[in-house]
Image: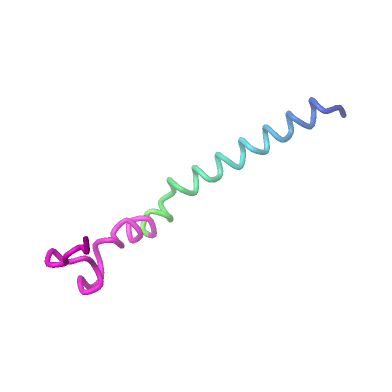
Amino acid sequence: MDINDLRSVVTVVGLLCFLAIVAWAYGRSSQKGFDEAANLPFSGDDDHGASSKTTHPR
């Protein structure tokens, strides 16, 4: 086994990891969690956010 065989194995393992991550990201079981995370900026109280009446110091 020389360095080129090792490089080939590392490339194939990297490709398989990438495909596993893509399958996880686009899988049906992950969709609910991603939808909840996408709506996080729109949920919660408005008391903690910036209001239109705030003034900025100069």
- Which residue lies at the image location 71% right of the left edge and 35% below the top edge? 10
Q: Judge from the rendering whether residue 44 lies leftward or rightward of residue 55; answer left or right.
A: right
Read off the magenta span.
Answer: 33-58
Q: Report the front residue among 21 and 47.
A: 47
Q: Report the front residue among 44 and 11.
A: 44
Q: Position of residue 48 (x, y in %)?
A: 25, 72
Q: Judge from the rendering whether residue 28 lies leftward or rightward of residue 43; answer left or right.
A: right
| Residue 3 position (above or below residue 36) | above
Which secondary structure is most common in the magenta stretch?
loop
Quarter location, residue 44: bottom left
Q: Residue furthest front?
A: 58
- Which residue lies at the image location 39% right of the left edge and 59% below the top edge? 33
Q: Position of residue 28 (x, y in %)?
A: 40, 51
Magenta-span inclusion, residue 20: no
Magenta-span inclusion, residue 36: yes
* Quarter of the C terminus within the rendering: bottom left
* Quarter of the N terminus within the rendering: top right
Q: Position of residue 24 (x, y in %)?
A: 49, 49
Q: Position of residue 8 (x, y in %)?
A: 73, 29
Quarter location, residue 11: top right
Q: Judge from the rendering whether residue 32 lies leftward or rightward of residue 13; answer left or right.
A: left
- Which residue lies at the image location 75% right of the left edge and 30% below the top edge? 7
Q: Residue furthest left?
A: 53
Q: Report the front residue among 58 and 21.
A: 58
Quarter location, residue 55: bottom left
